Amino acid sequence: MSGRLAELSARLASTHQLGSVIAAMRAIAASRSQQARRELQAIRLYADTIGQAIGQVLGTLPAGQAIAPPTAWPNGMLVVALCAEQGFAGSFNERVLDVALPLADEGDGHLFVIGDRGLMVAGNRGRRPDWSVPMAAHTDEVSTLADRIADAIDTALASRGPGRVLLVHGSPGEDEEQGIKRRWLLPFDFGRFPARLADGQAPLMNLPHADLLERLAVEYVHADLCEALMLSYAAENQARMQAMIAAHGNLQRTEAALTREFQRVRQEDITDEILELSAART
């Protein structure tokens, strides 16, 4: 076997191994995206339950008493960008930050970046966020991460005073397309919840209305964070799956070109050997 033929054979073997890795990464990404979509149902059910409880408490307020609508505070906003923790996710982080960074630049804005890959992309753009934390690597880490983000938001707002908090995150699409969504986390708007009693009966309450509504609002914000994180996790893995599909297509084209070249060089080597044998007999 000639040196060129040996080189092509080695490259073909390496291509086959790389194809196995790409296929495995694609399968893992697809599995994680599907798992996140399934767990979204439980998160949304939890949020609906809290929302119904808020509506029931609002339904027990004395006549003429209502919760004031949220105030539009003028001191900018805190933008929380939910990005990816791991690589090979295509342009996922770039598209999230394309939306988040201009919003954080408005007025006295601040930026939180969730996900080390997003932090890297922000750094490449010359941006240093006010706070960052790794993104959840598995779905069972989402609830704990939501608590960490909520604590960081509370700390930031305590030093700045009341403000607006906006989540920017990816969302998986039905046609393998990921959209970038904006979700207001704060100020909390009780007007979203219709005031009504279940079966016309007032719930049993052991806390004053204001205290109970505050605690329910905290739980609903936690559910909001969990839903946004789970959607982002699903979208990140969907983007990774699409990147692996594109990589597999490119790899197939490379493999086909290498195979053609291998066959051509092999034919040339066989022809040279036949000519040498023919010349030796004469």
Image (cartoon, rainbow, N blue to C red):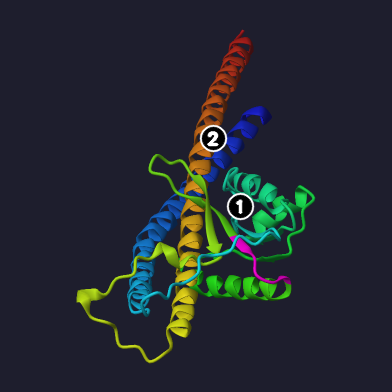
Question: Furthest-top residue in view?
Answer: 282
Q: Quadrant of residue 184?
A: bottom right
Residue at x-position 48% and y-position 46%: 241
Question: Furthest-bottom residue in view?
Answer: 206
Residue at x-position 35% and y-position 75%: 53
Do residues under tags 1 and 2 come within 8 Å of each other at their CB atoms? Answer: no
Q: Label 2: which residue?
A: 251
161 is within the stretch colored magenta: yes
In terms of secondary structure, where does tag 2 sit?
helix
Calculate the distance from the C-alpha at mark 1 to the C-alpha at mark 2: 19 Å
For the C terminus, give its image quadrant.
top right
Q: Label 1: which residue?
A: 87
Q: Amino acid at mark 1?
A: Gly
Marks 1 and 2: which is nearer the front? 1
2 is within the stretch colored magenta: no
Of residues 20 and 262, which is closer to you in this image? 20
Residue at x-position 47% and y-position 82%: 210
Left or right of 111 on screen, residue 202: left
Which span of residues is magenta-colored?
160-165
Count of number-bearing discs: 2
Percent position of residue 277, x then y: 59, 15
Residue 179 vertical position relative to residue 160 in the rendered view, above or below: above
Of residues 13 and 21, which is closer to you in this image? 21
For the N terminus, give its image quadrant.
top right
Percent position of residue 139, x then y: 46, 66
Q: Amino acid at mark 2?
A: Leu
